[in-house]
Amino acid sequence: MTQPQTQAGQPKVTYIKDDFVVFRDVEKFWLGKPGHTFVGRVERSWRHADTGKVLYDLVELSANRHRAGIDPDYMRLLPAADAMHDIDSAPLSEPDTGAMTPAAVAWLRLHLAQDAALPARN
């Protein structure tokens, strides 16, 4: 869960443990180097002793690497609705399952298997 806090420009967000975020390695980005944007999972937040700014420790998912002291100005939340959009918008009336994304097909198979395991209602 996040709690937006209004501010001019991009709203401030408080991230919590296990939020999925996209973040940038600021130095690589401004130097034009490749590999500057990553997807991560929030591990914890903490306040910098000198500046008082809240920073975050993340796990960079593609490399399973810990990244400490990430500035939230360079992080954005990855909403679950975006990750699940293909399933939510799958063409369920479509006879050709090839028209659906693999994630939608996997979800439907799981859902149908769970329904088949339920006893019949009387």
Image: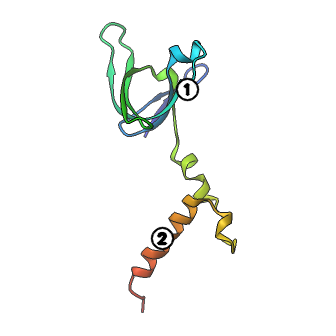
Q: Toward the viewer: 107 or 119?
A: 107
Q: Quadrant of residue 114?
A: bottom left
* x and y, in percent, of residue 23 in the image: 50, 28
Q: Is residue 63 left or right of residue 98?
A: left
In the rendered view of the protein, which quadrant contains the C terminus? bottom left
Seen at 46% across and 23% down, the residue is 72
* x and y, in percent, of residue 65 in the image: 37, 31
Residue 5 makes an appearance in the image: no
Q: Secondary structure at mark 1?
A: loop
Q: CA distance from mark 2 to mark 1?
A: 37 Å
Q: Quadrant of residue 47?
A: top left
* x and y, in percent, of residue 41 in the image: 41, 36
**Residue 117 - label:** none
Q: Quadrant of residue 105?
A: bottom right
Name the kind of residue labelled 2 in the image.
His
Q: Residue furthest left?
A: 49
Seen at 64% across and 63% down, the residue is 100
In the rendered view of the protein, which quadrant contains the N terminus? top left
**Residue 111 - label:** 2
Q: Secondary structure at mark 2?
A: helix
Residue bearing the label numbered 1: 11
Name the kind of residue labelled 1 in the image.
Pro
Mark 2 or mark 1, which has the lower sequence index?
Answer: 1
Q: Within 10 Å of the Cα at label 1, are there few (<14), some (14-19), or many (20+) other Cα atoms?
A: few
* x and y, in percent, of residue 76 in the image: 52, 31
Q: Is residue 46 left or right of residue 107?
A: left
Q: Residue furthest bottom?
A: 122
- Camera-side mark, 2 or 1: 2
Q: Give the vertical position of 22 relative to 54 (above or below).
A: below
